[in-house]
């Protein structure tokens, strides 16, 4: 009987040791099997990052530069339209801020792209053109409401991207551009909200149900390019008097 107990004890101890060994192996498995695999966040970052004299330039950095350019391609004409068709002073003031802010940011982003050897788009996206079409078709108070909500929703999405880029970029040119974009976008958010037409409940619902947006097709890495088109400056139409541009040293002077 004593021999049987000893055998059972040995057998039970063996099972425990085996189980513990399997557990340790399972815990250790992700460490050695995935540490160097491609497809991890770090591997993706390294694969999509190129070296420049201003610091590493990631895919997110390039996407951000592209989005700053795209924003000006549709928001500046939207701002000019708001100045002409807005039915309240607040809407017209928001339009003025859009014009000044994106004229300033467009000059900045074209300079940054040139120094990094990046190509920039000269046309807004299909989605942005659709927003402009919606504004073209609106009249009176409906126009004011559409303008405030379309532009406010767009700026909210850009604002979160600016913060992420500013926090993570290792490129000094992108960091400075993010600083300027942060100041400009926040100013635009405030003046759009000051119109009194922003539907905050709709913004919250959209944010809660929206899927992560796809990354914009980024330009080629820095290097010699043979693009047939140079970035065309974003400027108001002929005859429009441009208000004073926002500057990094005088952003606090904006109403």
Image (cartoon, rainbow, N blue to C red):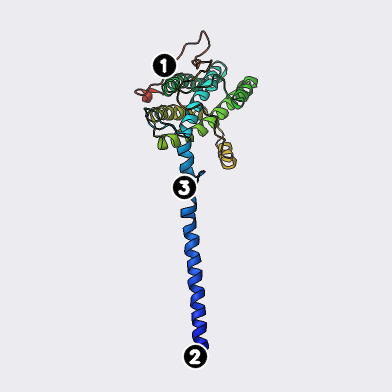
Point out residue 242 in the picture as x, y percentages from the top left corner.
46, 13
Q: Is residue 77 above or below residue 154?
A: above
* Residue extending farthest right: 137
Which mark is on residue 211? none
Label 3, secondary structure: give it: loop
Q: Is residue 243 above or below residue 20?
A: above
Depth order, front residue of 199/134: 134
* Residue extending farthest left: 249
The residue labelled by disc 1 is: 244
Which mark is on residue 2? 2
* Residue extending farthest bottom: 1
Graded by Cα atoms within 10 Å as few (under 14), some (14 to 19) or many (20 or more), the crowding at tag 1 reads some
Q: Is residue 254 visible?
A: yes
> Whole-Å distance between the Cαs marked 1 and 3?
52 Å
- Nearest to N terminus: mark 1 or mark 3: 3
The residue labelled by disc 3 is: 36
């Amino acid at each position: 009987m004593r021999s049987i107990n000893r055998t059972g004890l040995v057998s039970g101890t063996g099972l425990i040791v085996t189980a513990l060994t399997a557990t340790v192996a399972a815990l250790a498995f992700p460490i050695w099997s995935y540490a160097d695999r491609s497809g991890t966040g770090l591997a993706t970052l390294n694969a999509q990052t190129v070296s420049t004299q201003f610091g590493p330039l990631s895919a997110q950095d390039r996407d951000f530069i592209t989005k700053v350019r795209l924003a000006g391609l549709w928001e500046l004409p939207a701002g000019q339209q708001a100045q002409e068709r807005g039915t309240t002073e607040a809407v017209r003031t928001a339009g003025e801020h859009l014009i000044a802010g994106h004229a300033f940011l467009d000059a900045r982003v074209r300079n940054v792209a040139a120094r990094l050897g990046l190509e920039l788009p000269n046309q807004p996206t299909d989605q942005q053109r659709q927003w402009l079409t919606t504004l073209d078709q609106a009249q009176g108070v409906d126009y004011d409401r559409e303008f405030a909500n379309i532009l406010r929703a767009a700026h909210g999405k850009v604002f979160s991207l600016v913060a992420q880029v500013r926090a993570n970029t290792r490129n000094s040119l992108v960091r400075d551009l993010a600083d300027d974009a942060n100041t400009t976008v926040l100013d635009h958010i405030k003046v759009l909200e000051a119109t009194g037409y922003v539907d905050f409940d709709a913004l919250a619902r959209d944010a809660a149900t929206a899927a992560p947006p796809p990354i914009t097709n980024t330009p080629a890495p820095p290097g010699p390019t043979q693009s047939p088109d140079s970035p065309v400056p974003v400027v108001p139409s002929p005859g429009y008097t441009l208000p004073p541009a926002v500057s990094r040293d005088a952003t606090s002077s904006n109403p």
